[in-house]
Image: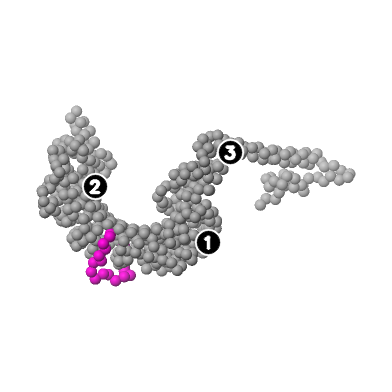
Amino acid sequence: MSPQCALCGSTENHALYDNGSLCRKTASTNPCNPCRKLAELSAQIIKVKQTLSEIQKEAQRLKSEMNFCHDRLIHRLPPEISSEIFQLSIPNEIIDVGLHRTYATSTPLVLSSVCQKWREIAHTTPQLWTSVPLRLGIKNHCSLPQLAQEWISRSGQLLLSINLFFDPSQSASPTILRPLITTINQYSTRWEYLNYQGPSSALSDLVGDSQGAPHLQTLKLCPCQSGFDGWSRFKLDNFKPTPTTLEMSAVRLKSVVIQWNNITHVQARQLFVDECLEIFRKTPKLTHCLLQHLPPGHHFPMPQSPILHRTLQVLELRQLVLPHHPDNILKNVTLPSLKSYKIDLQGYRLETESLISLFLRSSCSLQMLSLIDVNLYDEDLVALFRVMPELHHLELALSLRCGADTTEHIFRHFSSPFIVASGDTETRQAFLPQLQSMIFRGMAFVDWKLVADIFGSPSDIHNPRRRPLQSVSLNLYPVRVGLYRNDDPIIIDKDSLSRMLLLVEHGVELKITDMSSVKDVIQQSIEFHAHDSA
């Protein structure tokens, strides 16, 4: 810190006013003329600074009056009404923002920074402070525990949503995080939502207080560094929480010590296949399950017979490391309540045998099927569709390895028959008789009439026995010419285009997109034929 001036006490340019450099007045001599003038200027500087300070205080007072005059709402409403308005500015859903600041998490601070009146209202509205965003880094690890304490103190006694993030590019020892986690542990009885994305080595410090976490509903354990080294463990002191939603990544299943019987939603990444099956065993109330990026390995014995899970309704598999992983899961479960199944194979071949076996074994009424980036034989896909007569919504995204012939073979099955015969037996033999909507991605058609054929003729649109298909979205890539990409726009022939436009007039929702240019194929076909006719 700079030394103070001997005359005015300022630390600015103190050398100019250093008393030690002035002449000393004695009984026989007076200060030299420059020293005398400098002393006079120093006195004037002190007076000017005092005047400036008074002016700044008056300016601040006028700003407060200005805020009152300009803000015709908050300053004039009762505080409880203003508080309600502030609460409406907070998103209803918690947003996972990682290390990036967003409007959702900074809203209380923004409201507090407008003026003194707004700050008073914001700081006395506990609902604004229940979502606690903690972004720990090397630079702020000393100050963040105190800031967290102040933030939480404004939330009153309401339940808390704790979000702890740490920059994975920075190395951190558990001792750096321990003060912050100690602060968080003090409020475990108020945890409702806990999202941990810190180092795996510090997860075991998250133990709560002596009363546990009786209100915890959502638990997210996603260490920013792998927890496979055995350090990563979640276990509260003398208490097992009973969350309903669990998300975990790079944490071994045995390391998560909770009550599993209330879990309804699971998202799991980097678990072994046997751990995924163990989740089905542990969670009798599970309804939604997302499994992603399953590496090879095992910790639990594989079942001798399929696990019967009576409540699972939605199953999704993504980013699988090995193509046989879906089979290892599907052949080991029976899911009679399954309504929705989604899989992203990243270009691997879809082996339909285990999927067909699951649906037949489960006798489930599947209503939503999503097959993303799959490589397949069209006859296998047709056989799969035959065992799901109650399917309502289909999303089919073919791998680019599948050519235009695969697209056309599939759509030929859709186009015949589109009128369902009467009787339950005939309905089950028909091709997707209950389908209502479809999203398709693949190579463009050569025979465009197949698109119109899947709806039938306009006269059959209101036929009660017609397949209730009303919405189709086609995302198509131009057919390659040999090994080269085809940059020509996708154009529908005139006769097929006329049929499609007539169907649209009768209420059918049909959208076709050229994925090479992201243009509306119907519109560009209309313009092409209009120009061609001219």
The residue type indicated by label 1 comes to Pro
- Residue identified by numbered label 3: 64
| Mark earlier in primary sequence (2, 1) | 1
The range drawn in magenta is 294-312
Q: Is residue 248 left or right of residue 184?
A: left
Percent position of residue 65, x then y: 58, 36
The residue type indicated by label 3 comes to Ser
The residue type indicated by label 2 comes to Ile
Determine whether the residue tagged by mark 2 lies in a helix, strand or loop. strand
Residue at 84 percent across and 44 percent down: it is 25
User: Within 10 angstroms of label 2, few (less than 14), some, or many (20 or more) residues?
Assistant: some
- Residue identified by numbered label 2: 439
Percent position of residue 139, x then y: 53, 56
Dividing the picture into quarters, in which one does residue 534 lie?
top left
| Pick the front one: 294 or 150 | 150
Tag nearer the camera, 1 or 3 = 3
- Which label number is shown at residue 179? 1
Q: CA distance from mark 2 to mark 1?
A: 51 Å
Note whether residue 477 is visible.
no
Residue at 17 percent across and 53 percent down: it is 389
| Pick the front one: 300 or 344 | 300
Q: Is residue 518 left or right of residue 172?
A: left
Q: Is residue 105 above or below residue 197?
A: above
| Mark earlier in primary sequence (1, 3) | 3
Tag nearer the camera, 3 or 2 = 3
Percent position of residue 123, x then y: 53, 48
Q: CA distance from mark 1 to mark 3?
A: 38 Å
Residue at 55 percent across and 58 percent down: it is 142
